[in-house]
Structure formats: C-alpha cells, structure tokens
Amino acid sequence: MSSYNAERGESEIVDKLVGINRVAKVVKGGRRFGFAALVVVGDQKGRVGFGHGKAREVPEAIRKATEAAKRNMIRVPLREGRTLHHDVKGRFGAGRVVLRAAPAGTGIIAGGPMRAIFETLGVQDVVTKSIGTSNPYNMIKATFAALESMMSPRSVAARRGKKVSEIVGRRTKGTEEVQEQA
C-alpha cells in the first residue's frame, strides 16, 4: 500500500522545462558540447522548486535538473488556493520581479520562466512584472526570493500573538474609508 502512495505522490509532481543551453568546451580536437537544463517542479498545491542540471546529453541534463528541483522545493502560502496573500518584490542580481495578488478570473499574467513557476505552484490568479534582466536563471531566483518572503496572515498572527481577523481586516475598500474621505 505504501508503494502505491509513493507512486501517486511522484505522479502529482508536475515539472516544466524552462530552458536548455548548449555549452561548448574547446579541446584539442575541436569542441565538446554539453547541455545545461533549467527545470521547475511543483505539486500545484503550494510547493515549488527549481533545479539546474548539466550533462553531455539533453535527457540526462533534464533528469539531473528535475532531481535537483525536487530536493529544493519550498512551501508557499496561498490565499484560497488560487492567488498570493499580498504583493511582494524579489531581487537576485540584476533581476527584479514584482508579484501582485489578483482577483479571481485574472489568470496568470507572467512571462516566460515566471509563468512556469506559477503554473507548477498551483496559482490561478497573479500579475507579475520582471524588471531588469530577462536571464531565466536570475528571473527564477528573484521569483523564489519573493515567494520565500511571502507570509500568510496565520503565520503573522501567530508571531504577534494576535487573532487572524485582527491582522487581515477588510480586503476590499469598505464604506467606512469612503465616508471618512468625504
């Protein structure tokens, strides 16, 4: 029975190939080609990871990258299982990303490597912007830096010793704010 659960657990993990680079090493007889693969994996329930693998053949590089990604998975708190709890910025090298929570029905508005992260993470509604470099490695690392700094209202409330309702308040602009301004 446990082997069945292990197989099922493996099948739930979704992997997306972000990019493959062909790298050449110049040797006496000419060039030796190798391949570097960048892979993002996730369970579409709030866990995601990325990995990098290098090998002489493409399938081997992808396999190494997928194994590395499974080892480096992080848990990200999601609001209603579909979007982020709050807006967040991430930075790695010259790569900067802005991740914004979005209302239901927005979809994943993200480019390239960031889209792969949110699809494997299980986010349905998010708006993102990448600023600076378009290098996939730096974009992914900046996105992961932002996701690691994401905090759920429950964790903030526990840390401060308050109730979740005291932390969250109202998400939409209430009539009280509008009346105060008038």
Image (cartoon, grey):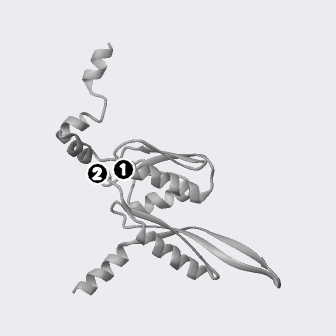
Answer left or right for 43 relative to 156.
Answer: right
Q: Quadrant of residue 103?
A: top left
| Circle number at residue 169 | none
Residue 96 in the image: above or below residue 113 = above
Disc 1 vs disc 2: Cβ atoms closer than 8 Å? yes
Residue 145 in the image: above or below residue 116 = above
Check disc 2 and give the amino acid type: Glu
Residue at image mark 2: 80
Please report the residue visible at 62 percent of the width from the left and 72 percent of the height from the top. 36
Residue 132 in percent (x, y) is at 62, 45
Residue 42 in percent (x, y) is at 40, 66
Residue at image mark 1: 83
Check disc 1 and give the amino acid type: Thr
Please report the residue visible at 26 percent of the width from the left and 81 percent of the height from the top. 5
Crowdedness near tag 1: few (<14), some (14–19) or many (≥20) residues, C-alpha within 10 Å: many
Answer left or right for 163 relative to 129.
Answer: left
Residue 108 in percent (x, y) is at 46, 52
Dot 2 falls on a residue whose secondary structure is: loop
Dot 1 falls on a residue whose secondary structure is: loop
Please report the residue visible at 63 percent of the width from the left and 82 percent of the height from the top. 57
* Image quadrant occupied by the C terminus: top left
